[in-house]
Amino acid sequence: MPARGFVFWALFPSFLIFALALPLLAGLKTVTAVVVLAATEVLSVFVLLGLWNGERFGWAWRGVAWIVFAGCAAYLVHGVVGGLPLIDRRSQPSLLNAILAFIAFGMPALRFALFGDLAPGGTDPEDSGEEFGSEEEDDDEE
């Protein structure tokens, strides 16, 4: 069983309370509200599983990435089809904000969901046998 440190014990209780209380507090008056609630609940369960054991439940982090991608894609589609203004204040929904959210969060989430990494070349220092951040220097002796 992996060691669970500060991050796990700091986040686990709050995520658990959030996941249990949200259905009781949400007003489910539209289909969109039900879909958003279901996605949020699934996201919370995936985060809890990933925090519990990231190696065993690595697929849960990919599920989180799929949900983030789907949310950003839905925001972008709503911006294009729903007639959001092109530019508005940063705090207001706009097509520019939807595009920026898709670029900043949606595309990296899709890459992680598909390939399981965020590195452009897919090179991981652990896979190459080199230690990341090693202090070895090349000595140019003449």
Image (cartoon, rainbow, N blue to C red):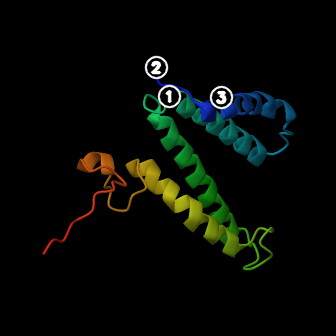
Alpha-carbon neighbours of circle 1 within 10 Å: few (<14), some, or many (≥20)? some
Amino acid under label 3?
Trp
| SS for dot 1 | loop
- Is label 2 in contact with label 1 (beta carbons under 8 Å)? yes
Marking on residue 53: 1
Q: Which of 88 and 138 is in front in this view?
A: 138
Name the quarter where the C terminus is drawn: bottom left
Q: Quickly name the residue at label 2.
A: 1
Q: Which of 124 and 35 is in front in this view?
A: 124
Q: In which quarter of the image is residue 42?
A: top right
> Label 2, label 1: how many angstroms apart (C-alpha)?
8 Å
| SS for dot 2 | loop
Picture residue at 51% right of the left edge, 54% below the top: 109
First of labels 3, 2 by sequence position? 2
Please identify the residue farthest to the bottom as the structure is shown.
87
> Label 1, label 3: how many angstroms apart (C-alpha)?
13 Å
| SS for dot 3 | helix
Q: Quickly name the residue at label 3.
A: 9
x, y (%) of residue 84? 75, 72
First of labels 2, 1 by sequence position? 2
x, y (%) of residue 78? 69, 64
x, y (%) of residue 113? 46, 49
